[in-house]
């Protein structure tokens, strides 16, 4: 993909230009791209189209079991969607219930979950513990125990690895105004 100095080869730029109906000058940055991003070396262009990402239940302790299967898949129908973008085809949105993650996640706001992104230390995650609670927290340790914290207190939650049924990466908050009804 790359030519000199990390720039895409001319043949690659020509293919991208043809595929996206743009000129080579637009792709090289001489002319605005109108929603098309040229990513760094070994990447591909992404169009920033909006998606309709399904909204399921809520999170933060006390989430009814009927919203997620034991494997962590959202179940049952949904009549709302988020007008937002995610490159994860399995992405879904959950409603935040509680204020332990304030100010980043406010009560009644929503969070974008991307199950195909592997969470690492420092990421926000949604997880289900073996007692059935589903929570959004910041992952701070994965060695020996899983450790999680909230944004607005210093309490650290510690779980043995076998106590976590599933865990997914939380990309970012979604404001309530981005939630739309299918009806």
Image (cartoon, rainbow, N blue to C red):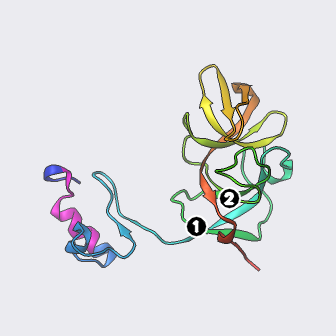
Q: Determine the residue positioned at 86% across, 50% down.
A: 64
Residue 178 in sight from this viewpoint: yes
Q: Quadrant of residue 163?
A: top right
The quarter of the displayed image where residue 131 is located? top right
Q: Secondary structure at mark 1?
A: strand
The residue that label 2 is drawn on is: 93
Q: Is residue 90 above or below residue 61?
A: below
Which segment did they paint magenta? 6-17
Relative vertical location of residue 166 with respect to residue 108 in this rendering, above or below:
above
Q: Are marks 1 and 2 in contact (CB under 8 Å)?
A: yes
**Quarter occupied by the C terminus:** bottom right
Task: Indicate the quadrant containing the N terminus: top left, top right, bottom left or bottom right.
Answer: bottom left
At 73% from the left and 32% from the top, the residue drawn is 164
Q: Residue 130 lies in magenta, yes or no?
A: no
In magenta stretch: residue 8: yes
Circle 2 SS class? strand
Between residues 1 and 111, which one lies in front from this camera angle?
Answer: 111
> Given the current orientation, which residue lies at the most extreme left position?
4
Compare marks 1 and 2 and give the one earlier in the sequence.
1
Position in image of residue 45 (x %, y %): 35, 63
- Left or right: where 10 falls relative to 20: left
Q: Where residue 20 sits: x, y (%)? A: 33, 74
Taking the image as shown, residue 169 lies to the left or right of residue 132, namely left
The answer to whether residue 91 is visible is no
Q: Which residue is mark 1?
A: 84
Residue drawn 21% across and 70% down? 14
Question: Horizontally, is 80 left or right of 62 in the view?
Answer: left
Q: Residue at x 54, y 65 (%)?
A: 85
Query: Where residue 126 sits in the image (x, y, percent)?
Result: 69, 44
């Amino acid at each position: 993909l790359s030519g000199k100095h990390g720039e895409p080869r001319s043949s690659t730029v020509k293919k991208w230009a043809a595929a996206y109906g743009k000129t080579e000058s637009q792709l090289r940055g001489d002319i605005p791209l109108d929603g098309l991003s040229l990513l760094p070396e070994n990447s591909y262009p992404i169009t920033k189209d909006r998606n309709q990402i399904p909204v399921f239940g809520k999170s933060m302790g006390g989430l009814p079991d009927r919203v997620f299967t034991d494997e962590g898949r959202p179940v049952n129908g949904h009549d709302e969607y988020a007008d937002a973008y995610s490159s994860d085809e399995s992405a879904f949105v959950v409603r935040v219930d509680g204020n332990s993650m304030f100010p980043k996640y406010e009560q009644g706001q929503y969070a974008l979950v991307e199950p195909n992104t592997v969470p690492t230390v420092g990421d926000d995650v949604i997880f289900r513990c073996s007692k059935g609670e589903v929570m959004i927290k910041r992952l701070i340790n994965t060695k020996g125990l899983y450790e999680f914290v909230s944004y607005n207190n210093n309490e650290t939650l510690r779980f043995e690895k076998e106590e976590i049924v599933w865990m997914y990466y939380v990309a970012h908050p979604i404001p309530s105004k981005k939630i739309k009804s299918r009806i």
